[in-house]
Image: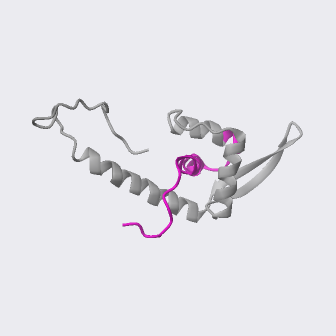
Amino acid sequence: MRSTSRPALREPSYFVLAALLGGPLHGYAVIKRVTELSDERVTLAAGSLYSVIDRLLGEGLITADGEEIVNGRARRYYRLTDEGYRVLAEEADRLARAARVVTDRLPHQGLPQGSTHQPSIARIRPA
């Protein structure tokens, strides 16, 4: 059972928070890291990234962590807050438990007796 009533994180938010686990990053670095961490399943354009960032800032899950000027443009860095770390850890646990509901029930050798369905998933892993 969840310890809070907060809704599950949307996949882009989950991967943005995960990208910041390694420390502060600026927007373009977040985009690249999200793409890597999600095996290219989540690709964020700048506009959608900043929508996610604005929402995470508003929820207190991330905070701005400095700014530098590069080629005449401000580059703002973001980092996880303690609350962001906690929410990300809870979400990772929730996803792992949800995946175990299936992986623990999958047959280890072949198909269940009498089944004609060929599984299309070779391996299921938590996101």
Extent of the magenta region: 1-29
Question: In the figure, 56 relative to 6: above or below?
Answer: above
Q: Residue 9 at x, y = what percent?
A: 52, 55
Q: Residue at x 40, y 52 (%)?
A: 95
Q: Residue 119 at x, y = what percent?
A: 26, 32
Q: Which residue is drawn at 70% across and 55% down?
A: 54
Q: Residue 122 at x, y = what percent?
A: 30, 31
Instruction: Inspect the magenta stretch and tell me whether residue 18 lies in it.
Output: yes
Q: Which residue is drawn at 68% across and 63% down?
A: 58
Quarter of the N terminus within the rendering: bottom left
- Going by the image, does 26 lie left or right of 90? right
**Which scheme is used to colour this image of the protein?**
one colour
Outermost residue on the left side: it is: 113
Instruction: Inspect the magenta stretch and tell me whether residue 91 lies in it.
Output: no
The image quarter containing residue 73 is top right
Question: In the figure, 86 relative to 124: above or below?
Answer: below
Question: Is 37 in front, or is 48?
Answer: 48
